[in-house]
Amino acid sequence: MSQTPVTDDAGGTSSGGSGPKNPFSRTWLFLKQVFDELRKVIVPTRRELLNYTVVVLVFVLIVIGIVTGLDWVLGHLSELVFGGGAGG
């Protein structure tokens, strides 16, 4: 059975715990990293956004059709198995 060393890294940083201890410095570092990541985001063009929207809508319609078909089939199967009701 192998043992893994326990580290005292409460901040969640992988830099060996050498991050800032001051809460304001940690908040500033977090915000700086957020803005650095936001600069990497690629905003889709209008044509790409329209294309993605159409693909999602078509996929949703297909899933709705599958679920509706399964509901219809299982409804008719349950009527065959359990009978058609009181029939009054």
Image (cartoon, grey):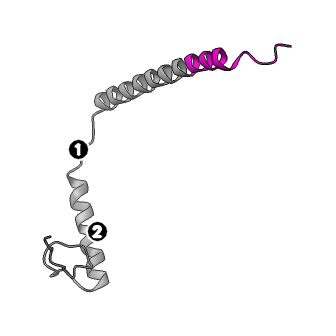
| Residue closest to the eye, 47 or 76 | 76
Instruction: Decide: few, some or many residues near mark 1? Use Cα within 10 Å; few <14, some 14-19, many ≥20.
Output: few
Q: Which residue is mark 1?
A: 42
Residue 19 at what x, y percent from top left?
A: 18, 80
Label ID, residue 10: none
Reading the chain from its start, which is encountered first: label 1 or label 2? 2
Reply yes or no: does residue 85 show up in magenta.
Answer: yes
Q: Which residue is situated farthest in the right direction here?
A: 88
In which quarter of the view is residue 7 placed? Answer: bottom left
Residue 53 at what x, y percent from top left?
A: 38, 29
Q: Quick check: marks 1 and 2 in contact, CB under 8 Å?
A: no
Element under disc 2: helix
What secondary structure predominates along the stretch shown in magenta?
helix
Reply yes or no: does residue 12 show up in magenta.
Answer: no
Residue 72 at what x, y percent from top left?
A: 58, 17
In which quarter of the view is residue 62 placed? Answer: top left
Q: CA distance from mark 1 to mark 2?
A: 19 Å
Residue 57 at what x, y percent from top left?
A: 43, 26
Q: Which residue is mark 2?
A: 31
Q: Amino acid at mark 2?
A: Leu
- Picture residue at 23% right of the left edge, 44% below the top: 42
- Picture residue at 30% right of the left edge, 75% below the top: 27
In which quarter of the view is residue 88 placed? Answer: top right
Element under disc 1: loop
Instruction: Decide: few, some or many residues near mark 2? Use Cα within 10 Å; few <14, some 14-19, many ≥20.
Output: few
Please say if 70 is above or below 19: above
- Picture residue at 68% right of the left edge, 20% below the top: 82
- Picture residue at 15% right of the left edge, 77% below the top: 5
Please say if 80 is above or below 35: above
Q: Amino acid at mark 1?
A: Ile
Q: Which residues are magenta?
A: 71-88
